[in-house]
Image (spheres, helix red, strand yellow):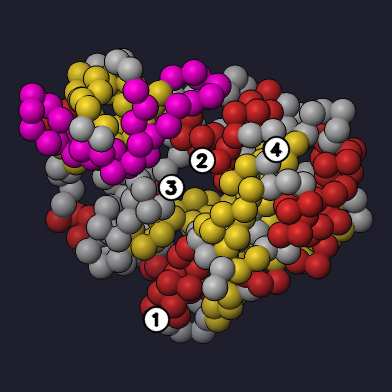
């Protein structure tokens, strides 16, 4: 039985094409279509419902110690309001999930996890907690909206004071408001563009949605669905759980070494990652140089031999290229390496390219 976000009725009313995703019914696109939605985010602004994401509080005297042990990144040098991305590993060094931790205060952290993994992640935290700490799943209390694109901040400034807006990327302002609606404003996103993610009590979701769309008309703001969210994160080469990583793929293999602090005293999975420090496979970018579009779960060949598989693939609307990401044997991961992908029985020529495929001009 799929769940509905607080904005389900708003999506139906706006002509959203509803599909099941991560246990929720969500719009894959609206009447504008994926390409127009994608281009709106790259050139103007787009609004996404990401209320399916999960939120967990970690509170207590030993909150930091728990986060340090459960997650691979280091959190002991954060300031209040700062956010930090981190994988969460199992004992074998595989990835349980990737998530974002916000520091509210020394004994209070706000953790945002992937929708499909919400229950698994929460149980993992409960199973590994120690000392004076309390983990609370507060997902049902929150809606989350992502306002993304070069005009996103102009729209936001119409609706809230400058001091309520975080100045730096991966920072948030807690206990603030937008258009008089209580929320957390976070300078984060999953599109490769400037913008914010707003966390607010579920009961205000539709009011916030309507207010943002109304006030963003001049800037070209349109509602965007899961389709554009995926093509945008693909162009920006942002990994997606269940594609670029899972319980059997380590964060080091998928290129997340920046968020794995091996100098930390200990964390779950550290020993396994040390034992497999020499990687046999890693994530790369592929660009199609022949004709065709590559998708996930397709075999990648070098000289007739399977050397890995694609993890995601699409045609990037803004870059106007067919691209994908793949997990390949390290011997074939140098930029410029020519390979082939089996697309439903037809060999498509590809080349290993540097990631990301798209990077916004600052």
In the image, residue 171 above or below residue 362: below
Q: Quadrant of the N terminus?
A: bottom right
Q: Are marks 3 and 2 in contact (CB under 8 Å)?
A: yes
Distance between mark 2 and mark 4 Cα atoms = 17 Å
Q: Which tag, 2 or 4, sits closer to the chain's start?
A: 4
* Position above or below: 98 against 132: above
Residue 96 location (% of width, % of height): 36, 63
If you read the primary sequence from the N terminus, does the residue marked by circle 2 or circle 1 appear first?
1
Point out the residue furthest to the left here.
304
Q: Which mark is residue 230?
A: 2
Report whether 68 appears left or right of 300.
right
In space, the residues marked 2 and 1 are separated at their CA atoms by 32 Å
Label for residue 31? 4
Query: Measuring 41% from the left and 59% from the top, which residue is drawn there?
Result: 97
Mark 3, residues whose alpha carbon is within 10 Å: few (<14), some, or many (≥20)? some
Question: Which of labels 3 and 2 is toward the front?
Answer: 2
**What is the C-alpha distance between the residues marked 3 and 4?**
26 Å
Residue matched to label 1: 127
- For this rendering, which residue is in front, 46 or 128? 46
Q: Position of residue 103 (x, y in %)?
A: 61, 60
State whether residue 223 is above or below residue 273.
above
Side (left or right) of 166 relative to 253: right
Which stretch appears magenta? 292-321
Give 151 or 8, whichever is nearer the viewer.
8
Alpha carbon of mark 1 to alpha carbon of mark 3: how far?
A: 25 Å
Q: Marks 4 and 2: in contact by CB < 8 Å?
A: no
Q: Assign a secondary structure to mark 1.
A: helix
């Amino acid at each position: 039985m799929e769940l509905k976000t607080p904005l389900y009725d708003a999506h139906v009313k706006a002509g959203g094409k509803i599909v099941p995703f991560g246990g929720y019914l969500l719009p894959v696109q609206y009447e504008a279509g994926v390409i127009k939605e994608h281009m709106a985010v790259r050139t103007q602004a787009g609004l996404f419902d990401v209320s399916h994401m999960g939120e967990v509080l970690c509170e207590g005297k030993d909150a930091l110690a728990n986060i340090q042990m459960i997650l691979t990144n280091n959190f002991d040098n954060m300031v209040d309001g700062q956010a930090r991305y981190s994988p969460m590993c199992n004992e074998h060094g595989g990835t349980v999930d990737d998530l974002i931790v916000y520091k509210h205060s020394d004994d209070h952290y706000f953790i945002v996890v992937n929708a499909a993994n919400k229950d698994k992640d929460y149980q993992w935290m409960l199973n590994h907690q120690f000392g004076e700490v309390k983990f609370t799943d507060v997902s049902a209390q929150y809606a989350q909206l992502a306002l993304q694109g070069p005009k996103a901040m102009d729209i936001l400034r119409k609706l809230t004071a400058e001091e309520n807006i975080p100045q730096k990327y991966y920072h948030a302002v807690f206990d603030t408001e937008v258009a008089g609606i209580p929320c957390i404003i976070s300078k984060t996103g999953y599109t490769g563009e400037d913008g914010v993610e707003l966390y607010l009590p579920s009961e205000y979701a539709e009011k916030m949605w309507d207010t943002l769309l109304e006030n963003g008309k001049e800037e070209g703001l349109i509602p965007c669905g899961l389709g554009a969210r995926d093509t945008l994160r693909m162009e920006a080469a942002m990994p997606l759980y269940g594609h670029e990583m899972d319980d059997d793929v380590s964060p080091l293999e998928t290129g997340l070494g920046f968020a794995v602090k091996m100098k930390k005293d200990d964390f779950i999975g550290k020993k396994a990652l040390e034992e497999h420090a020499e990687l046999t496979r890693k994530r790369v970018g592929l660009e199609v140089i022949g004709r065709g579009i590559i998708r996930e779960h397709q075999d990648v060949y070098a000289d007739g031999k399977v050397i890995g598989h694609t993890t995601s693939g699409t045609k990037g609307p803004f870059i106007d290229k067919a691209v994908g990401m793949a997990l390949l044997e390290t011997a074939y991961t140098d930029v410029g390496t020519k390979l082939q992908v089996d697309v439903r029985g037809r060999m498509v020529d590809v080349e290993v390219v540097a990631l990301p495929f798209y990077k916004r001009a600052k």
